[in-house]
Image (spheres, grey):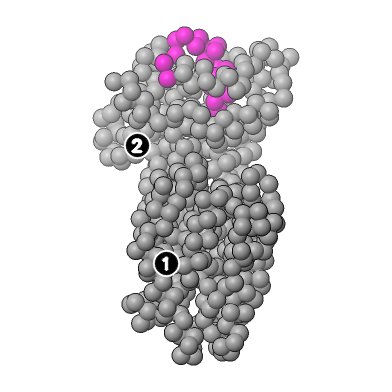
Amino acid sequence: MIVLNGSSLNLKQMKKILYKDEPISIDPDSMEKVKQSREAVERIVMDQKTVYGINTGFGKFSDVRIREDDVDKLQLHLIRSHACALGDPFPERVSKAMVVLRLNALLKGFSGVRPCIVNRLCDLVNHNIIPVIPCQGSLGASGDLAPLSHLALVLIGEGEVHEKGRVRPTQEVYQEQGFLPLELKAKEGLALINGTQAMTAMGAVNYIEAERLVDQCDWIAAMTMEALEGIIDAFHPAIHEARGYPEQMKVAERIRFLTKGSRLITRQGEKRVQDAYSIRCIPQVHGASRQSLGYVKEKLEIEMNAATDNPLILEDGQTIVSGGNFHGQPIALAMDFLKIAAAEMASISERRIERLVNPQLNDLPGFLSPDPGLQSGAMIMQYAAASIVSENKTLAHPASVDSIPSSANQEDHVSMGTTAARHCYQIIRNAQKVAAIELICAMQALEYRGITLASSCARELYSKARTVVSSIQEDRIFSKDIEALDDWLISGRFNWSVQDEMVNRT
């Protein structure tokens, strides 16, 4: 059970909630803060003070005063009118993360919602009733208005939800669960949608999947290195200590461990003096991508525990201020950084694929074909990888440098953070497919070298991956192999943590 309090949620906990369905609960002290902030909103309504979003219109309509009798209706109109997101739904895991993050933000006690709102969000997570949220339509300021409006629809019994693998009307699922639709009161609609939870939820999933990807790429690159009889001298600890990057040193250490005991690995001058950069510079390139993960993790964990709606109820309800915490620029920049880092993992992987299949660059059968000429072998797999890598270059263009004014120029600079996060997800998934292609080629090359000569780690990976994709004895429809291995890489059925392996084997 993970207890949410608005200030201590981390990515490790989020991974348990999203990937292992760990239940959540609400910290009682945080619920007291929620109650106190709600009392402040009710005093404002009663005293008829003019406060943005409570008894005024929104955006350019902020100067329009709303009658006391209409403040609740204002919130309903807000949710329905703003629920105009488009495109395919976010992955279910991302939408679940949005619910968790919106709940966690409200528990800070700055938003003025009633306890029933946070309790319902908690119920949705624990019952795995997840809003269907279209992925396009957010500018990333004033937060993720359109996507989060689709989340808010579910609270009032409207919209659709994912439930037990199906998409169903919220109303039907509520009836089965015995839930009643909530009627939003003053400020609650705005508190639910004015924030960065869509981009941050997508970012959290991106981080978790990118973290797995870089571990996998180390394993696969090590196998490729053995298949190409790579030179281990370039991974000498002193080389990497001389430069000083901890992540670079870590990757070099991982490669040394993964190739330990291999009779295929060579020394400097035995077969050649130097390897190509895609082999020799694995620590420098993979390590740099790992550096970005550290930056992204820091920004995500701050944002996951941030109050990002507007206005905020501060100083025990005595101060209510309109600000700009909904602006997604910190996450937009982080996601653009992660896009580049993931794209580079695919880029260097594709270059290793080329070295595995190109007969001018190795002494293996051309394109790893069982009958070169009659059969093409892995020739077009390299084409597919190259195509994906090129696509990633387009997706990696920074979204955060773009902006477009909205709400009659009241909201005149936006972050495009959700676009950055969505493109980042696509790049990571693309990179995973390139890694799958490299693994197919590395396994085939290792067979030609002699699998018994490989390191114990390479033999272990080979044994497990061969249960998914068989040896290439004859040309076949390789897209099925790539997709099957891609699914296996995503599944988490293999322990990619070298650190765990090092402990277990010492």
Residue extending farthest to the front is 178
Q: Is residue 454 magenta?
A: yes
Circle 1 residues within 10 Å: few <14, some 14–19, many ≥20? many
Q: Can the viewer see residue 357 in this picture?
A: no
Task: Identify which residue is drawn at 66% across, 72% down.
Answer: 81
Q: Position of residue 382 (x, y in %)?
A: 62, 29
Is residue 171 located in the magenta-colored stretch of the structure? no
Left or right of 44, for residue 370: right
| Up-down relation of residue 377 to residue 180 (above or below) | above
Q: Which mark is residue 307?
A: 1
For the C terminus, the image quarter is top left
| Closer-to-camera residue (226/10) | 10
Circle 1: residue type: Ala
Disc 2 marks which amino acid?
Answer: Gln
Q: Of residues 381 and 233, which is closer to you in this image?
A: 381
Tell me where residue 183 appears, x and y as whole percent.
Answer: 59, 72
Residue drawn at 61 percent across, 54 percent down: 177
Find the distance from the CA under tag 1 to the CA under tag 2: 35 Å
Kindly tell me whether residue 466 is visible in this rendering.
yes
Q: Position of residue 130 (x, y in %)?
A: 59, 53
Q: Is residue 384 left or right of residue 272?
A: right
- The one of 428 and 202 positioned closer to us in this rendering: 202
Magenta span: predominant SS is helix
Task: Name the residue tied to disc 2.
Answer: 248
Q: Nearer the viewer, mark 1 or mark 2?
A: 1
Q: Secondary structure at mark 2?
A: helix
Relative vertical location of residue 491 with respect to residue 363 in this rendering, above or below: below
Q: Quadrant of residue 28?
A: bottom left
Q: Read off the magenta span.
A: 435-457
Which mark sits nearer the N-terminus, 1 or 2?
Answer: 2
